[in-house]
Image (spheres, helix red, strand yellow):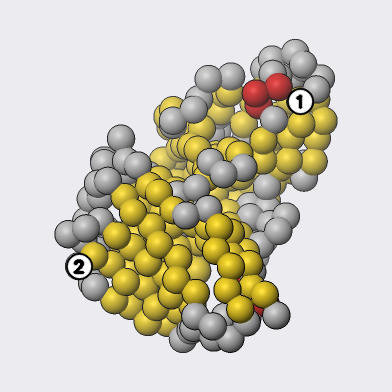
Amino acid sequence: GEDVEQSLFLSVREGDSSVINCTYTDSSSTYLYWYKQEPGAGLQLLTYIFSNMDMKQDQRLTVLLNKKDKHLSLRIADTQTGDSAIYFCAVPDNYGQNFVFGPGTRLSVLP
Amino acid sequence: NAGVTQTPKFRILKIGQSMTLQCAQDMNHNYMYWYRQDPGMGLKLIYYSVGAGITDKGEVPNGYNVSRSTTEDFPLRLELAAPSQTSVYFCASTPDTNYGYTFGSGTRLTVV
């Protein structure tokens, strides 16, 4: 089945850029997602990219997709303390019916 | 518009007890999902439903059961609670498999 990997931890200084990476083993052609989870809360849809795109920008967020290497990344520009959270990538399973979530990357923003 | 509502938020069960985790959505979404979240493991799919009357197993269904008698509700049943079921449970819904999911705020379950 689909295997999705992420680094578990990332620390950055306030104002710097953060880059969260995600690799996957297989994916049907559809949308790939990034979710944000704040402490004690559920996951919130953050942004997405369609599989025929290389890049998508949404204000401070930039999503990059390298289909050849099966690599997805989320860049957060001018990272703020409010960006401290766990970030999950989600990719379609082999049947395109459900999404497989990565283990999540805990982003800590230092003042 | 409440979105996805989960109850209870917290629960402590003794080994062997049963309980039902409730999930309701008011967005008329056909697709609903139950996940469990364990530290450093991401989310694992327990069961899902593509519409009222239709349910199917996910990656980790053992020890759980579901039903989907209406579009709005998707309860998760634990029949004989075990310590391995200590986790945070999330319910989610979507109108279409190409759309992102809307998640509930979760139920933190501890089995002692």
The lab-note entry on whether marks 2 and 1 share a chain reads no
Q: Depth check: A82 or A50 in front? A: A82
Asked whether residue B96 is in view, the answer is no
- What residue is shown at x 75% (from left), y 13% (from top)? B16
Residue B33 is situated, as x and y percent measured from the top left of the image, at 51, 42
Q: Which of the 4 image quadrants contains residue B80? A: top right
- What residue is shown at x 55% (from left), y 33% (from top)? B69
Please determine whether, in this image, residue A39 is positioned above or below residue B64: below
Disc sitting over residue A81 in the figure:
none
Disc sitting over residue A52 in the figure:
2
Q: Label 1 is placed on what type of residue?
A: Val
Please determine whether, in this image, residue B25 is positioned above or below residue A59: above
Residue under mark 1: which chain is it in? B
- What residue is shown at x 67% (from left), y 35% (from top)? B87
Q: Mark 1 highlights which residue?
A: B111
Category of crowding for the residue at label 1, using alpha-carbon neighbours closer than 10 angstroms: few (below 14), some (14–19), many (at least 20): some
Q: Label 2 is placed on what type of residue?
A: Asn
The Cα atoms of the two marked residues, 2 and 1, are separated by: 45 Å
Where's the C terminus of chain B, which quadrant? top right
- What residue is shown at x 45% (from left), y 71% (from top)? A19
